[in-house]
Amino acid sequence: MRNNNAKSGIITILPDGRGIINSTNDKFEKVFVSKVHLNGAFDQDEVKYTVQRSYHSSFKKAKIIQILKRKKNTFTGRVYNEGKNIFIIVSPNQSKNIKLIKYSRPITDFTVVKIDIVDWNERGPFAHGEINEVIAQPNDPLADHLYVVNKYVINGLLKVDSGFENFDLDGFISDQKDRIDYSLLNTFSIDPDDAQDFDDAISIKFQKDIYELIIHIADVTAFVDEGSSIDHVALQNSNSYYFPEKSYHMLPYELATKYCSLVPNEKRLAVSLYFELTSDGDVVSQQAHLSTIKNKNRMTYGQVNELLSKSENIQKHEDIFLLYEIHKKLKSKRLKEGALNLSGGESTFEFDHQGSPLKIIDKKQSVSHSMVEECMLLANKYAATLLSSKSLPIFRNHDMPSRRAFLKIESLISAFSDKPKNFNDFIGSIRSTKKRGVFSKLILKNLKRAEYSLTNKGHYGLSFDTYIHFTSPIRRYADLHCHRLLKNVLNNQKTPQIGSVDKIIKKINQNEQKAKNAENEYNRLKKIKYIKLNQEKIFSCTIESLSKKYILVNINEANFTATLSTSYLKHDRYRLARNKHALVGQFSNKTYKIGDELKVGINKIDMINQAVHVELSN
């Protein structure tokens, strides 16, 4: 029977297993799909759906009634045996199981394989697949890495002959005209210890009560012509990927790490943004130039932090201390103007020789990192102002939260503070680092996602009216595109449009999300492995959210969200507070609140769905 109310669209599967459909009938319509209504849909499938009536939600909800077209038939997944059957899991909470056929040999659980779906068996419970390739055994130290890079097609990044193998770089730089020579300045860079490519460097001095700050950004466009094969590959990649085991560059390796990179003690081409600032951090003059520079001193974040800790270093490293002073003024002004200052949740790992995580380290923003960040924000903001008045850049937008989201955040703040506070004051008032991280995460969940667009909506998180990405052209295509526009402005040239900018924006938004998903899944796999290796321990946790059936807790040591069933709580009848920030026992009056710390033991580790279940410790 035909359903006249049915619509079609492309579904995106979220990490928790739910879906969002972007309608092809109405480009502004987005509808949510619960796990039970996916009807076997996988990520990016074209589906037919009906919108369900919803009286208690502001979001439209849908039910998928048919898969119109599968996005792909080849997947990277992991094996798990169930009785005499062998199944392949390609993502946590996948909506349709894949059963392996025509394979009679034993195969170990969690072997990484590439499979081809030979029959989707749309009306049946299982799709049928055949092994195309065995990628890694479960005990291979690189198994998690190979699973992620194959799943997200990072290993399949397009290759191109850059043509720069015997390139005369010195001659090329000498032939450049109409560039300011900044190579005699005391220029330095500050990067992570393991940095492979250097997008930016800094020069600074202070005279006549004015800071002269020059931010140099690698001139990638001098080597990558618009519309060239290298440019095409760069767009298909859209960004670089960095894993502990290996890096995958957006550009050919020799361009990313040698010719474009602002490596130490070598002349390089740059786009330099020149600023004059008062002692209070007010910009009184700003200009952009094409330039030639030499990075005289490549430093790491750790080295700069060490330098700043000793006052006797001031004379020898005056420029570092000048940058430290001006960065404090810039950051203070930005926060006063409404920029958010929330705690991050990134982690790094220490591994043994078998690739097992021995330690998980929370990434904290150090002073040296903040110094560089303020420079890059200043440069991006100026480039945005310059380009938006003379060109049509790709904006980096962070739209304001919805009214519903604002109310949820205000409810959270009012429930846990004595008097009204803004976001930053509230987070700053929390003394516990772990608790501060949990509340930052809850606020971030209610904010919209930053994205690229041709329409300027401003950047809410940074409190900037106009913002672009400009300072990382070696590893982000959006920056490379904006560099081309700026060079055209500086050379008084019109901007030629090769291809559609809309297509560029769609591609870089998609690939940015893919990169985040790949990083998140890699981290999740390593964290679960760490918890499994330490599953006999009692862990300290912080409550993140509550419902009648379960409590989500952050395992502090691993910065990993686990599930605690309310059936493990002290026997009582528990009531969820109206604001959903507390769970209260009706008879004992025992209360569990967001931010409370608990001691838990590991109850179950679900490697298939990448989940950890915990129970209260005695």
Image: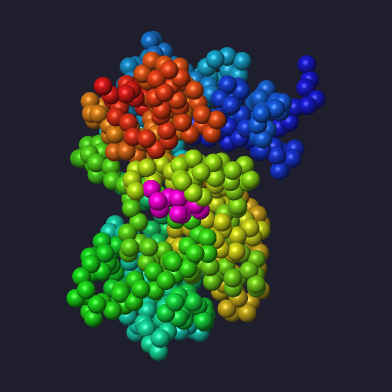
Magenta-span inclusion, residue 422: yes
- 418, 336: nearer the viewer: 418
Return the x and y of residue 323 as percentages of the image width and height. 35, 73
Magenta-span inclusion, residue 181: no
- 207 shown above or below 509: below
The answer to whether residue 326 is left or right of residue 423 is: left
Return the x and y of residue 222 as percentages of the image width and height. 49, 71
At a point 51% along the width and 53% down the height, the residue shown is 422
Quadrant of the image occupied by residue 232: bottom right
State which quarter of the image contains the C terminus.
top left
Quadrant of the image occupied by residue 20: top right
Q: Residue furthest right?
A: 4
- 508 shown above or below 111: below
Return the x and y of residue 77 as percentages of the image width and height. 42, 29
Residues in magenta, as a range: 421-430
The answer to whether residue 77 is left or right of residue 297 is: right
At a point 23% along the width and 28% down the height, the residue shown is 537
